[in-house]
Image (tube, rainbow, N blue to C red):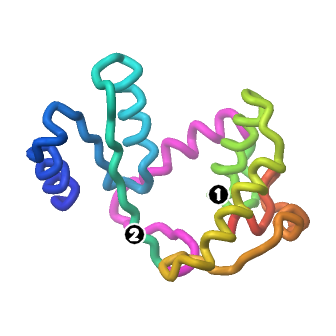
């Protein structure tokens, strides 16, 4: 995709951003870009980093778009399967749920923290005409909805 490269070049050429390293993302998410940015600061390569990214969402649940090549998530799922059992739950819920479990074990995060994130996201979605889902739910509704993959409930996966 050319747009992020053009944006990066035009921002770099502006006088205010001379010498600033820009990271951009055309991937499934901006996570890699954020990691690159953090690493650049951590290693002392940059004092300030601007991470840019975009994502084009489509209506409905995520699905496999290209069947003529290896799925970008295959390696991730292999690694996940080596540390956690694959269950009949939706694979996306397992990926985020297992990441949540790891965060809980490492930092003491509680399920209520994830529920509050879903609450905030649903609350903001009603004001976003481009939001994939635009329904608002209370914190109690989110916590009481059926568990899809512990610690995630249906309304945290929606």
Question: Does the stretch in magenta take in 112?
Answer: no
The residue under label 1 is 91
Foreground tag (1 vs 2)? 2
The residue closer to the viewer here, 107 or 82, is 107
The stretch in magenta equals 59-84
Quadrant for residue 69, please give it.
bottom left
Q: Seen in the image, is 114 located left or right of residue 38?
A: right
Of the 4 image quadrants, the one containing the C terminus is bottom right
The residue under label 2 is 56
Total labels: the figure holds: 2
Dot 1 or dot 2, earlier in sequence: 2
Question: Does the stretch in magenta take in 77?
Answer: yes
Residue sitting at x 83%, y 50%: 112
Residue sitting at x 37%, y 34%: 37
Q: Is 40 above or below relative to 13?
A: above
Residue 137 location (% of width, % of height): 78, 74
Residue sitting at x 65%, y 50%: 96
Residue 54 location (% of width, % of height): 36, 60
Q: Assess disc 2: are there few (<14), some (14-19) or many (≥20) residues with their C-alpha within 10 Å of its C-alpha.
A: few
Q: Seen in the image, is 15 located left or right of residue 97?
A: left
Q: Assess disc 1: are there few (<14), some (14-19) or many (≥20) residues with their C-alpha within 10 Å of its C-alpha.
A: few
Q: Is 66 above or below relative to 105?
A: below
């Amino acid at each position: 995709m050319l747009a992020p490269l053009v944006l990066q070049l035009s921002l770099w050429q502006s006088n205010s951003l001379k010498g600033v390293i820009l990271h951009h993302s055309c991937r499934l998410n901006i996570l890699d870009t954020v990691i690159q940015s953090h690493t650049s600061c951590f290693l002392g390569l940059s004092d300030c980093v601007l991470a840019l990214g975009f994502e084009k969402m489509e209506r409905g649940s995520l699905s496999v778009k290209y069947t003529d090549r290896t799925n970008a998530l295959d390696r991730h799922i292999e690694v996940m399967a080596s540390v956690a059992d694959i269950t009949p739950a939706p694979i996306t819920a397992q990926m985020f749920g297992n990441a949540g479990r790891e965060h809980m074990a490492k930092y003491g995060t509680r399920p209520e923290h994830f529920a509050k994130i879903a609450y905030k996201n649903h609350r903001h979605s009603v004001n976003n005409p481009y939001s994939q889902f635009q329904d608002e739910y209370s914190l109690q509704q989110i916590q009481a909805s059926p568990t899809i993959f512990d610690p995630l409930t249906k309304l945290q996966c929606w």
